[in-house]
Amino acid sequence: MEYVPIIVSILSLILAGYTFLSKNSKENTTELTTVIVSLDNIKSGIADIKAELNSIKSSQKEDHDKLIRVEESLKSAWKQINKISVGSTNEEENI
């Protein structure tokens, strides 16, 4: 995923160089300019997707950490419940 912007930039440079060296008609230059602009738009879109993906990863890590804390708390609560249950059973037997 990191190579895509580099590849897009290289393709843009190649197309610009081709346009400069070929001295084709104005129509070809316009078409190549359109292609370069489109490639730049793709590049910025990829950058946006990358930023959003990083945000999602961060959010997922936070959720994972919260889940771990909840599981630890639940485990502790069950231990306390079991201690109380065992304690009440022992008290009933002593009566």
Image (spheres, grey):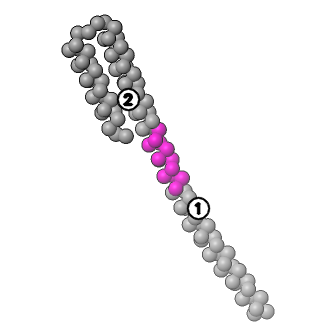
Name the element at disc 1: helix
| Residue 43 - label | 2
Name which residue type carries label 2.
Lys
Residue lying at 53% horizontally and 61% vertically, measured from the top left: 68
Residue 81 % position (x, y): 67, 75
Q: Nearer the viewer, residue 60 or 77?
A: 60
Query: Residue placed at 71% from the left, 80% from the top?
Result: 85
Q: Nearer the viewer, residue 93 or 75?
A: 75
- Name the residue nearer the viewer: 84 or 43: 43
Give the SS element for disc 2: helix
Magenta residues, dominant SS class: helix
Q: Is residue 26 above or below residue 79?
A: above
Q: Earlier in the sequence, mark 1 or mark 2?
A: 2
Quadrant in the picture for residue 28: top left
Callout 1 amino acid: Val
Quadrant housing the N terminus? top left
The residue mark sitting in front, 1 or 2, is 2
- Residue 95 position in % (x across, y down): 79, 92
77 lies left or right of 57:
right
Residue positioned 40% across, 24% down in the render: 41
Q: Which mark is residue 70?
A: 1
**What is the spatial separation of the Cα atoms under label 1 and label 2, in whole angstroms?**
41 Å
Query: Over which residues does the magenta segment extend?
Result: 52-64
Q: Is residue 83 above or below residue 16?
A: below
Q: Is residue 9 magenta?
A: no
- Residue reaching furthest to the top: 26
Q: Position of residue 91 (x, y in %)?
A: 74, 88
Q: Position of residue 26 (x, y in %)?
A: 31, 6
